[in-house]
Image (tube, coloured by chain):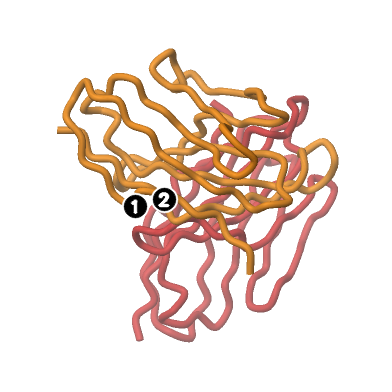
Amino acid sequence: SQQGEEDPQALSIQEGENATMNCSYKTSINNLQWYRQNSGRGLVHLILIRSNEREKHSGRLRVTLDTSKKSSSLLITASRAADTASYFCATDFLGNTGNQFYFGTGTSLTVIP
Amino acid sequence: EPEVTQTPSHQVTQMGQEVILRCVPISNHLYFYWYRQILGQKVEFLVSFYNNEISEKSEIFDDQFSVERPDGSNFTLKIRSTKLEDSAMYFCASSERSGRAGANVLTFGAGSRLTVL
């Protein structure tokens, strides 16, 4: 399966701390994206990193990509209670039309106020 | 901000019944998708659709499933004879372009929860 795997499965931190989530995948990719899902809702796109990029920032989010290790990390700095959600990485693997995204199993983040 | 809308938000059906889930993608998007998520589990790709035909599908998307764009706005997922294991949240998504044309960001609807009894 090309699907990514996030770890940890669950993460609980205090407000103000940083949260780091990791994603590993199996095949070469075009892009890797991170999505967020609030309980019972749809997924919301957070950030995209291309296969030729190593790091990307967006507000309090920092994403890294290591294609040699087939892994990515999402760092949320200065976390807030509102960041409580599940976070998924999604990959579209190189060679197909790019119209099939594979999502990981997700990391459930709880930020304690 | 444009959004993907899905109906119904929750449907309860008896095993063996047909179900149609509806989606209205973002109007200028060309690519449409269905994903499903069994409670607490991973988000699984079902099918992608472009230019009125299936672009790609997963092994989950067997003969019990079909998709259709019956008019210029709706995109539907039909399950012909539902099984207990079809109980899940079904998400519709759309994107502006293909992954080959550049970055392909999916916009998801809020989902339709299907419960099969």
Instruction: Give the numbered dot on residue B72.
Output: none
Residue B89 x/y as whole percent: 35, 44
Residue at numbered disc 2: B111
Q: Kindly indicate the quadrant of the structure image that contains residue B14.
A: top left
Indicate the chain on which mark 2 is placed: B
Check the rendered structure and report the hue given to chain A: red
**Residue at screen point 57% across, 38% down:** B33
Q: Amino acid at mark 2?
A: Gly
| Quarter holding residue A108 | bottom left
Residue furthest top as drawn: B63
Look at 62% across and 46% down and name the residue there. B94
User: Which element is circle 1 on?
Assistant: loop
Kind of residue indicated by mark 1: Ser
Q: Which mark is residue B9?
A: 1
Q: Horizontal and vertical percent for residue A52?
A: 85, 47
Q: Earlier in the sequence, mark 1 or mark 2?
A: 1
Q: Are marks 1 and 2 in contact (CB under 8 Å)?
A: yes
- Where is residue A54 drawn, in percent x and y? 79, 55
The answer as to whether the residues below labels 1 and 2 share one chain is: yes
User: Which residue is located at x 67 percent, y 27 percent?
Assistant: B52
Q: Which chain is orange?
A: B
Apparent side of residue A51 relative to residue A85 in the rendered image (left or right): right
Residue density around tag 2, few if under 14, some if 14–19, many if 20 or more, within 10 Å: many
> Which of the 4 image quarters holds residue A60?
bottom right
